[in-house]
Image (spheres, rainbow, N blue to C red):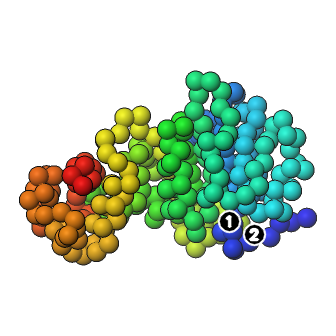
Amino acid sequence: MKHVARKRFGQNFLTDAHVLNNIIDAIGPRRGEAMVEIGPGLAAMTALLLKSLDHMHVVELDRDLVARLEKAYPRERLTVHSGDALKFDFGSIPVPEGQRLRVVGNLPYNISSPLLFHLAEFAPLVEDQHFMLQKEVVERMVAEPGTKAYSRLSVMLQWRYDMELLFIVPPEAFDPPPQVDSAIVRMIPKRERLACDGARLEQVVAKAFSQRRKVIRNCVAGMFTEAQLVEAGIDPGARPEAVGLEHYVALANLL
């Protein structure tokens, strides 16, 4: 029976064989690796990944799709975790000694930012992440300081990951087609990141980007003095999107 995509789950199923093969090539799955797919849907990507993997895990919210997956694949090939990826403990997935978890998925666009922040908690356990996301979100993730797309998301994710936009995917590659372009992003957790407390960095960045049109002096008034901004290497008259990651880290360390 044909599964009808559910809007409340943000379902857009990737159906273009050429795009699917390009994604698999970018991921480069190898036997013996521990891999988890978020939102496998109708298993178009799952089926291709399993050609190169002995076993994999998937996290799926839609119970109808969970039942379909469990019926289609034996447990020794596919472990299906029925539930919300936003609440899932990715640290619970067994990984062979000396390896880290590989994470892939066509992420629901309606929860992409909170899901990326949830996954960031598990970054030390992860080898790499390959995701399909709304193109605009990926552009924000990889944005350089001084560009319009540079944002809180850019700073917080660039502190944890090296990221690269691999290629664009047009709406017609999906069923039903979304109303936006999509993009594939590669995220590799940094093994040595700039030293600071993540919660303090989040506090500083949230405050700085809460009023983008103001200069940073005004955005963080009450949190830092002008002298402290200068101490962190920041021009107090600069806008938040002109301030680089290392300077936000310096501010977090001043808190």
Q: Residue 85 got which mark?
A: none
Give the class, few, some or many, for how many residues have Cα within 10 Å of label 2's Cα (few <14, many ≥20): some
User: Does dot 1 land on a helix, a strand or a loop?
Assistant: loop
Q: Nearer the viewer, residue 167 or 121?
A: 121
Query: Along the horizontal axis of the image, is 178 left or right of 254?
Result: right
Query: Along the horizontal axis of the image, is 222 left or right of 97?
Result: left
Give the class, few, some or many, for how many residues have Cα within 10 Å of label 1's Cα (few <14, many ≥20): many
Residue 36 in picture, x, y percent from top left: 67, 43
Residue 106 in picture, x, y percent from top left: 63, 56
Please give the name of the residue rendered at 31% of the width and 41% of the height, measured from the top-left corner: 195
Indicate the amino acid at tag 2: Ala
Q: Nearer the viewer, residue 146 or 174?
A: 146
Can residue 151 be spotted in the picture?
Answer: no
Indicate the amino acid at tag 1: Asn
Report if the CB atoms under discs 2 and 1 are less than 8 Å apart: yes
Q: Residue 5 got which mark?
A: 2
Residue 43 in picture, x, y percent from top left: 76, 51
Please give the name of the residue rendered at 13% of the width and 64% of the height, measured from the top-left corner: 225
Q: Is residue 2 above or below residue 74?
A: below
Please give the name of the residue rendered at 84% of the width and 35% of the height, measured from the top-left corner: 76
Residue 104 in picture, x, y percent from top left: 61, 47
